Amino acid sequence: MAKLEVNFCGVRVKNPIVASSAEPTLNAHNMKKCIDTGVGGVIAKTMTDSPAMRELTTRSKWRFLNERHEVCRGKVPRAFSLYGRSGLALEEPKEFLKEIKETLKYAAEKEAIVIGSIASTEISGWVELGKQIEGAGVPLIEMNFGCPHPKLMPGIRTGMNVGQDFDHGCEITQAVSEAVSVPIMVKVTPQVTDLVEFSGRLKEAGASAVTLTNRFLGFVPDIETGKPLVYGQAGVGGPWIKPLTLRWINEVRKAYRDEIFIAGTNGAYDWRDVVQFIMSGAHIVEMCSAVMVYGYEWLGKQVRGLEKFMNEKGYDDVDQMRGIASDAAMAYADMPPEKAHVNKELCNNCQRCLKVCFYQAMQDGEDYTWLKEENCIGCGGCYSVCPVPDAIEITVV
Ligand SMILES: Cc1cc2nc3c(=O)[nH]c(=O)nc-3n(C[C@H](O)[C@H](O)[C@H](O)COP(=O)(O)O)c2cc1C
């Protein structure tokens, strides 16, 4: 039987799937629902001392969008977007800490962990919130430098406004890490130039882990009304965004290997994605949007799916999968030469490959398509569009 347990920043997590900080972890009631599914842990909705960021949540609204970025009614497709406006935890810290304590008690019985999440607008506030949440008993603190919504609120220096200011982000990280003794993870915004540099600087400043990444800001007009959905710019993400997140996980893994832990978030839809996050280098994977579409039970299905996959593939533990795809990634210069090969017996001469060959390698043979080998560079376009299994193969030459 595969072992799902992972070591994350020195903390034992019974499996790598974690409910990320958002509405499914809004309060003790919701967090318990997540814990009941069998997840490794939950990250509480971000606790804040900013009244403006709390008030925002009372006006939350979101829509699930289809592939054309139109509002879904009923069926939500696999490649959905979650487009929405929201803020941070509703209660002020004194009250929210009670929710955390209640959840911690419940989680202990189920061997799940509860991670605290914080955001302030001043360094002293970050430190104070860090101490308070550590005092409640959490084993890890996530600092939210990624929330996109403060960008839409002039004068509110938190979330993404901090994540885009590397110097200030490092100042906060150093101050909080000196003030608390539990490990700190920093959740960053993807809307920056270089997360490798920032991750390295955060590590130097005292972070044990980076959370790659929070969501983007987007803008979606409704062409019928000429007005934007949900009244304007909003946070946007969904399963389609996964490759962008994995690219950063790949780079941070390459740069720092075991010197920094990685929590992956932004694009994990199901257990297959969780495997891809882990193979890219993530130690734990946080999930939100899919839970907001399908409900809490979705999380449990992914834990079971991950376990089944590992058993079928013969992985003894999560460490055996971690980073293997990142470690196998090659520079352009190291890629072996490849060519297409057309199996004449199977070719039905649909000529789709002809339309997508831009190197004049595919040739019209009237009743079949043939390959002019010297022109083929093995790009693989023909392989992707060919509808007949095995009619086109790409091989190393
Ligand atoms: C409605 C909503 C509220 C969120 N609230 C928070 C929050 O309070 N703190 C935080 O760190 N991230 C927050 N997030 C970001 C999620 O935790 C998560 O990182 C993000 O949605 C990407 O993961 P996903 O692709 O699984 O949705 C929120 C996301 C959504 C959609």
Image (tube, grey):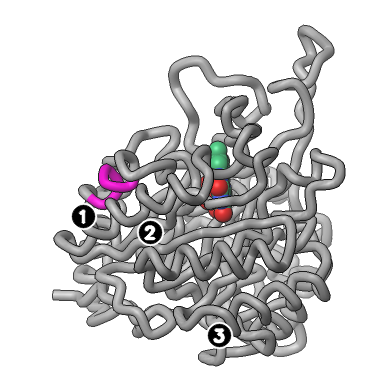
Instruction: Examine the rendering and report whether any part of residue 336 can be seen.
Output: no
| Residue that carries the numbered disc 1 in the rendered image | 106
Indicate the secondary structure of the residue bearing disc 2: strand
Indicate the secondary structure of the residue bearing disc 1: helix
Q: Which residues are magenta?
A: 31-35
Going 81% across and 15% down the picture, which residue do you hit? 227
Binning the other alpha carbons within 10 Å of mark 1 as few (below 14), some (14 to 19) or many (20 upward) gives some
Indicate the secondary structure of the residue bearing disc 3: loop
| Residue that carries the numbered disc 2 in the rendered image | 18
Q: Nearer the viewer, residue 74 or 365?
A: 74
**Label located before the other in sequence (1 or 3):** 1
Instruction: Examine the rendering and report whether any part of residue 70 can be seen.
Output: yes
Q: In this image, 174 relative to 263: left or right?
A: right
| Residue that carries the numbered disc 3 in the rendered image | 260
Q: Quadrant of residue 30?
A: top left
Q: Nearer the viewer, residue 397 or 257?
A: 257
